[in-house]
Image (cartoon, rainbow, N blue to C red):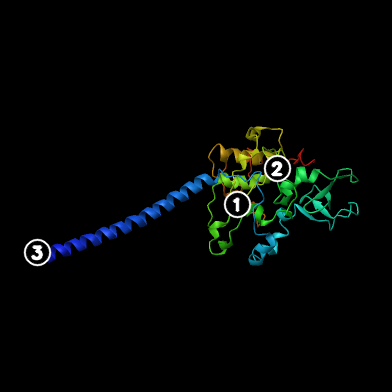
Amino acid sequence: MPSRNVGRADALACRGKLRLAGTQWRMYARRLTGTLAGAVFAANLFAQSHAGQPIPKYVTGDECLFCHRVKVADTWQQNPHAQTVHPREGFGSFPADVTDILGARSHHRGLKPDGYGKFDLLLPDNKTWDKQAFALRCAGCHTTAVDPETHAFSASALDCYACHGVAPENHGTDTSLVWFSKKHSRDPKQVVSICGQCHLREGKSRTSGLPYPDNFVAGDNLFEDFQVDLAKAGDPSLNPGDRHIVHNVRDVISGGSDVTCISCHKIHDHTSSRHRLVLSGPICLDCHRAEGPKKAVKTYTVHSDLCEY
């Protein structure tokens, strides 16, 4: 009898260990599956594209600023990204029917509404209105969420969605879900995709044939739809400002560089002071003189055939 009880106890103990081992294995398998799924998701993420699809549902800037009203709302209206289209106050030289201004810097054009998500563009003669030019040339970089079919925009100027993408409802408890948050991954190719959607002015959409991306959403591979000649990084006829951007994108996409726009530029603070901390390289010569000093910057005129200045 004693030997039978010992054998039974051993059997129960062995069964318990097997159950525990089975549970541990299932937990490990689930963790491994999750890890692999995450890796596959991350690998496939850069292959996604929304070109030709409907605009996704997204949280608007007004909703964002309800929570981000301290560190963002107090300075956002002065940021050039918020002034790509802005009210005409202070621009008295335009005709009386101009309601808005295209452009945040020294080059400006007059606009007037022409239905939902539409603007007529005032031509350089300051007299003639073009009903198609803004939608077919300007809207993709000066407004937010341009419909691929109608070319109507959802918001004038650049809304939070333009750079941060679709923010899930639970992003308040998990900020890693939002692009450019401190906890979100910053893959260089996706960073230059987000910035390049507007700042690469030498490209064309394969889907629409227009000079701006077709329904780009942060996290997409910009270059699935947007054709850009990266050889222009060495084209001396391209003004240094635009050439610098093409140069950086080429270094990231083709050369594996991890230096991106946000390595130097703090977007919300509207400063590039961090670029002084980046190691010097050939790309610096787009703007700086080889003989130095580093603070000396080449003088040049920014011009664009697309933007007509």
The mark found on residue 3 in the picture is 3
Q: Amino acid at mark 2?
A: Tyr
Residue at the image position 62 percent from the left and 54 percent from the top = 164
- Of 33 and 139, the residue lying toward us: 33
Residue at the image position 52 percent from the left and 45 percent from the top = 44
- Residue 74: percent from the left, percent from the top? 69, 64
Cα–Cα span, label 3 and label 1: 77 Å
- Of 60 and 150, the residue lying toward us: 150
Residue carrying label 2: 212
Residue carrying label 1: 274
Of the two numbered discs 3 and 2 in the rendering, the one whose residue sits closer to the viewer? 3
Task: Using a 10 Å C-alpha cutoff, classify the residue at mark 2 as few (fewer than 14 neighbours), some (14 to 19) or many (20 or more).
Answer: many
Name the quadrant of the N terminus.
Answer: bottom left
Judging from the image, what secondary structure is the residue with disc 3 in?
helix
Task: Using a 10 Å C-alpha cutoff, classify the residue at mark 1 as few (fewer than 14 neighbours), some (14 to 19) or many (20 or more).
Answer: few
Pointers 3 and 1 in contact (C-beta within 8 Å): no
- Residue 73: percent from the left, percent from the top? 68, 63
- Residue 238: percent from the left, percent from the top? 71, 35
Sequence-earlier tag: 3 or 1: 3
Count up the numbered dots: 3
- Of 154 and 75, the residue lying toward us: 154
- Of 145 and 7, the residue lying toward us: 7
Sequence-earlier tag: 3 or 2: 3
Pointers 3 and 2 in contact (C-beta within 8 Å): no
